[in-house]
Amino acid sequence: MKVFGVRLPGMSSLLLWGLLWEIVGRSGYSFFVPPLSEVVTTLFEIIGTAAFQKALYETAYAFCSGVFFAIVIGIPTGILMGKNRLVDELLLPWVNIFLSAPLTALVPVLMVLFGFGMKSIIITTTLFAIWIIILNARAGVMQINRSLVEMATSFGATPWSAFSKIYFWAALPEILGGVRIGIIRAVKGVIIGQLLISLVGFGALFELYSNNFLMKHFWAVLVVLFALAFTISEFLAYLERRVSYYAAKR
Amino acid sequence: MAMLQTDALAEELAPLQTDNAVSVSGVSKNYGDVEALKNLSLDFPRGQLTSLLGPSGCGKTTLLKIIAGLLDPTEGEILVNGSPVTGPGEDRAFVFQDFALLPWASVLRNVSFGLELRGVAKSEREDIAIKYIKEVGLDGFEKSFPHELSGGMRQRVGLARALSVDADVLLMDEPFSAVDEQTRRKFQEDLLALVANENKTFIFVTHSIEEAVYVSDQIAILLPRPSRVADIIRPTGLREKDTASIRRDPEYLDIVDEIWESLKTYVE
């Protein structure tokens, strides 16, 4: 964007919103909105504490495991659904139901099935992320150029090499788009898991700070979480742009 | 009765046909109730270029894909070098109308992709690919990507890929229809050189009468609904001519006219 002929770097608008936050905070409008500057100061105070680092570790562990399972199960399932009519007919209704279902309501069921520990949190995270990854991989495969498949077949490709050398790469732009949205959903999943299943990680910190009305601390943790999610999402968007040169030419 | 006689005649001629690289006999292909091909028989002499020419919807691409093993015929049999076709095989290579290149792979990887799928080791397949990239005139473009090339250059990549697997039979599905006119002329000349130099059998699908007459040793005219071979034309004197003077040759002009006369009633 250009303002008065000066090219602004990306996300300059965040400065404006940050400023607004600061003004609202200083005006004393609400106890729940401390000024941004104080939130940032608190952020640096708590970032070194053992409690924060433990929370970060627990959250990162659950998040990464959940996303890992969502990706390694979701992408092959989606590709298979795009390739095989029968598998598609079998699974598509379920994928669509779970994609739009209020998964939070399922969490108590997961607790009964898998206990109150890390396992349930990881499964919750996976359940939040996996459906959109499946649907996107499926969509990517379904729009594949038929003659690429015929080409591979005519040169005697085995099902596995067609899968790994043609289908995966042809669907990669859509797959990355799905993973990006899936990861954003996984952030939601991991925090909801930590709040509902067992109070660990960032979920425990949120609970602790909001119950004790430590709003600066509360916002600081939230800012860290947003920043992490945003960074991962932008990194995937960057990967997506790297493959977009061929997205239009398949 | 007449049918019996032709059958007997065909059997008598059979021993003479041993030098057919590809032989199609009694092939039918139905899509539900639609008969795309009906009882079609055609032979493709070894080392020569045979064109399948006909109006759109005459099933020429269907026939080519059946020969390639990409489609199964409803009835009939295809022999390649005497053995029946049951699927794609190393004796055939396909050149696609829309090139069918991997957009995420370099020219080098695209050209060697056929060999990659056949399990040839990386250094070996790249050596072969480099040789054919040079042969089709794309020297220096090994590291380019398909979207950086023109349509004509992309089809050269497709051609190099088909050549590098060293199949006996090259199946070309309207390979020059997606490139511009001047490039197409250059391609046609290069194809004549290829037929002369490579000891391969070419099966070439086209809808252009001029192109078919220019490049072919044998032209099979296919008529639609259901598809059948209406005529087989073998230009006799054109191969010896210089590539530049073929289009002025009386035989060339006569054949083009003759084919147009027989096809024009089928053009909507």
Image (cartoon, coloured by chain):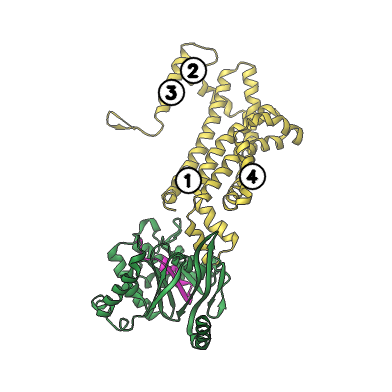
Q: Which residue is mark 3?
A: A17
Q: Are marks 3 and 4 in contact (CB under 8 Å)?
A: no
Q: Residue A194, percent across and down?
A: 66, 30
- Tell me which chain the residue with mark 1 is part of: A
Q: Quadrant of residue A74?
A: top right
Name the spot of residue B78 as percent of width and height, x first: 54, 74
> Tag 1 or tag 3, which sits nearer the N-term?
3
Chain letter of the yellow region: A
Residue B70 in view: no
Which of the pair B122/B136 is nearer the observer?
A: B136
The chain letter for the residue carrying disc 4 is A
Badge 3 amino acid: Trp
Q: Residues within 10 Å of mark 2 (few under 14, many from 20)?
A: many
| Residue type marked 4 | Leu
Q: Is residue A104 left or right of residue B231?
A: right
Mark number, residue A35: 2
Along the line of sight, the residue nearer the viewer: A51 or A8: A8
Which residue is label 1 attached to?
A239
Decide whether residue A182 is among the magenta residues.
no
Q: Estimate the x, y position of residue B34 in percent, counting from the top left.
A: 51, 60
Q: Earlier in the sequence, mark 3 or mark 4?
A: 3
Q: Amino acid at mark 1?
A: Leu
Residue farthest to the front, as pictured = B1
Name the residue beneath numbered marker 4.
A91
Q: How many marks?
A: 4
Q: Of helix, strand and loop, which one carries label 2?
A: loop
